Image (cartoon, rainbow, N blue to C red):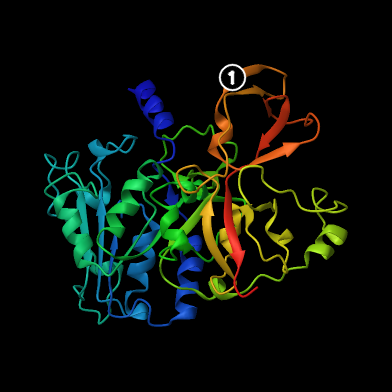
Amino acid sequence: MANSNLKEAKAAKNDEFYTQFHDIEVEMNAYLEYDPNVFSGKTVLLPCDDPEWSNFTRYFAAKFDELGLKKLISTSYAPDAKKMRLLSEPTLFETDAPQFDPSKAQTKGKIFILDKDLSGDGRINIDDLHWEYLNGDGDFRSKEVSELRDEADIIITNPPFSLFREFLAWIVSANKKFIIIGNMNAVTYKETFPLIKENKMWMGYSIHSGDREFEVPDEYPLNAAGWRIDENGRKFIRVKGVRWFTNIDHGRRHEPLPLMTMADNLRFSRHKEIKGKVSYDHYDNYDAIEVPFTDAIPSDYDGVMGVPISFLDKYCPEQFEILGITKTWFGSASKIYPEQIQVDRQGKKSKVTKLNDGAVLLHPQIPQNETYYIVDRKYYTQVYARVLIKHIGL
């Protein structure tokens, strides 16, 4: 059984993370600072949440009265429905409750509701949280959880990373407000990028770079690059590239980027890829310049620019228009390359068609210390995914 659990844990390593209370609080405070009534009178749904462990439930239950919530609903997956079946024993929270049913503990999800003062102390807080078993396993795609979605005003959670596409589509199909966590690379998904381009979704306030620490179950294998065990024996791992995704406004979103002119960037930029060059590189298969760093965006260039996806952390919709992304399913490349010879860093050669998957740079000589491609005796490289933008008003 132990070996089986470890295999399942590795296969589902991105799906069983518990967000830290501090990270939740910092993010929610940003929306409250922009609009103090953002949660007032609202029903908040926390699906995929494991309330016995989750800090999302703890945060909103503790601040129920302060935020002026109308209702808080949390739902959890049944242990048998999880990809990582490590928490197989019911918690004391569950077994000590009068509604505990051992025949349902493994196969049924749970719903937690907070909407009234059950303890009689004149406040609504975590002591008034009431739970029951769901009819199903708690999958967000089920009819009963979808009905809870329809009842809610705002959906907030850290969904299973492997189901991010489906979860986002599930929210958007019901036209709901949301604040959720996902991997930064999700911006390149065909289900995700159109929402960003049309200003129907954007990055949250507080996570902009580096990694974040998440708590994991006791039996979780600590094979991540960064991990620790605290004084109470709780396990934590650090996950790179996570972001908040939302369609609720916050102040940072409207702060314009301070930028230098193109001439000043070429002369003074702190990046060796920019400083001292005659001009910015231009894509071979799209009419745009390559801007490899957000702080190197020229303030006076009126054409299309390809910028890193991390630009979205600082995107101001009053300053820039998002035109597309350098992926074939989003844009109209100006040329199609025939089959190429790929030469990797070790000199290994293979026949591929990868150049047609993104923005391409043409080089006058063989590029050094990076994978390159040969077509008709010409040398090319492909840049990472780039967001295509243009200044507004230039």
Identify which residue is drawn at 41% across, 44% down: 161
Residue 218, quarter of the rendered image: top left
Regarding residue 229, the answer to whether it shows in the image is no
Is 231 in front, or is 345? Answer: 345
Decide: is 83 above or below 1.
below
297 left or right of 174 in image: right
Of residues 13 and 167, which is closer to you in this image?
167
Nearest to the observer: residue 161 or residue 212: 161
Q: In the drawing, does residue 258 fall left or right of residue 130? A: right
Give how far across and how far down residue 296 sits, in percent: 74, 59
Q: Is residue 193 left or right of residue 210?
A: left
- Give residue 334's quadrant in the image: top right
Q: Does residue 40 appear in the picture of this structure?
A: yes
User: In the rendered view, would you say 331 is above or below 226?
Assistant: below
Q: Residues within 10 Å of mark 1 (few under 14, many from 20)?
A: few
Q: Which residue is mark 1?
A: 351
